[in-house]
Amino acid sequence: MTDKNTIGLLLYKHLQGTLTDEEAQLLEEWRRASEDNALLMEEIDNEEMLTKRLEQFHPDNKKAVRDKILQRILAARHEHPAVRRLPSLRWVAAASIVLALVAGTYFWWQPDGKARQAETVSTLEDVEAPQFVRAVITLADGSTVSLDSVANGSVAVQGNINIVKDADGKLSYQPSASAKGKEQEEIYNTLHNPRGSKVIDIALADGSRVWLNVGSSLTYPVAFVGKERKVSITGEAYFEVARNATKPFIVDRGEMSVQVLGTHFNVNAYEDEADIRVTLLEGSVKISDTRNAASGIIKPGEQAVFSQAKDGEQIRVTDDVNVEEVIAWTNGMFHFAGASVAYIMRQIQRWYDVEVEYMGDVSSVNLSGIVSRKKNITNLLGALEATGKIVFKLEGRKVIVLPGKY
């Protein structure tokens, strides 16, 4: 098989549009050789992902790196004027680091920029990444609809609202043909996305979209008929709220409330996490704590941290947040930046629906890296093991965590 350096060069030329017919055939053979290769090719062809990786792997000097790379690319384009124009110069600049990024699927990246090859996890059998949406809707009368066992199209009717599942598994709440001019009563549904499921995407009746992570639930009215649009969650969800200046959108999680008019934000409110974290990408949100009447307003790029402990401190707002890490799950990625092993394993538990057992103290171990959530569990654990800081044994659906050599 062609070595990775050669493949890296071919991927670089692929993005530049300068592959010969022979090189294109070689790259296509490599792509078809394995699912990992096909996935890596897909990621490298994604402009958004490539741009994000440029910034992620060069956080301290990303502008200087981009400028330097851009100069090299422009020089190459001057030498090869027939090169096709690409959608953005920033993407072209990012393409020049493909030689480094090609290792991203096979290696775990360290803060010092070095990478080690992933080792083989001690295992009896593998656990594959979720293949289906296994979410369940609890309707107003208490009956349930399992989305992995119903056909596409209308799956239920609630009042004057049709619940529709499309070919991609996305849900939407749509007024029925007979609903025009009729008043809709306020009735509630709950969408639960269990561990071991794919992320579920739902469009609410007002046009707001919600992505619900695994191990999470969303309770919401099938139609927003009052003076406000209120939903409640457990777990994690990413919201893109439809703007309505006369009807604020409110997300409740126990004693924490988030109020917005129209914006994009992420709420991480798992019960097994010490804090609830609200991260804003666009717009403005107000966070309230009903325990002590405290509140705070956050701006894009900021995060509000709300302690779930009864005697916890008031809301803290910080701008020291890696937004790409926060929303990586919506892009099908695990992204850890100096994360504790316990935090990483909680994510692994939810996604793969496995048990975790610790044998030895790993509380001081922190890891960084990016790995696709489409990969089987041994690929992810092997990448973590490659740091030398941690070791895993996989027994069925149990992951045993041990301290590493270093």
Image (spheres, helix red, strand yellow):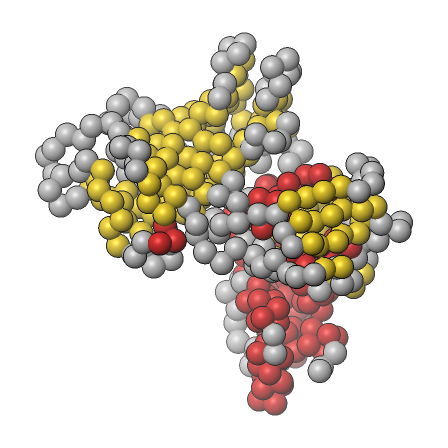
- Judging depth in this view, the residue of 330 and 59 nearest the camera is 330
Say whether residue 70 is visible. Answer: no
The residue lying at 61 percent from left, 58 percent from top is 127
The residue lying at 68 percent from left, 76 percent from top is 7
- Judging depth in this view, the residue of 342 and 110 nearest the camera is 342
Q: Residue furthest top?
A: 292
Relative side of 176 to 273, left or right:
left
Q: Quadrant of residue 153?
A: bottom left
Q: Quadrant of residue 183?
A: top left
Quarter of the image that includes the N terminus: bottom right
Q: Is residue 336 above or below residue 276?
A: below
The residue lying at 54 percent from left, 31 percent from top is 269
Q: Where is residue 36? Give x, y as percent.
A: 62, 68
Q: Residue furthest right?
A: 406
Q: Is residue 346 above or below residue 332?
A: above
- Judging depth in this view, the residue of 129 and 258 nearest the camera is 129
Say whether residue 31 is visible. Answer: yes
Relative side of 328 to 387, left or right:
left
Q: Is residue 345 above or below residue 86?
A: above
Q: Where is residue 396? Give x, y as percent.
A: 65, 55
Q: Where is residue 349? Give x, y as percent.
A: 61, 45
Q: How many marks?
A: 0
The residue lying at 26 percent from left, 23 percent from top is 226
Q: Is residue 167 above or below residue 1?
A: above
Relative side of 397 to 185, left or right:
right
Q: Where is residue 24? Give x, y as percent.
A: 58, 84
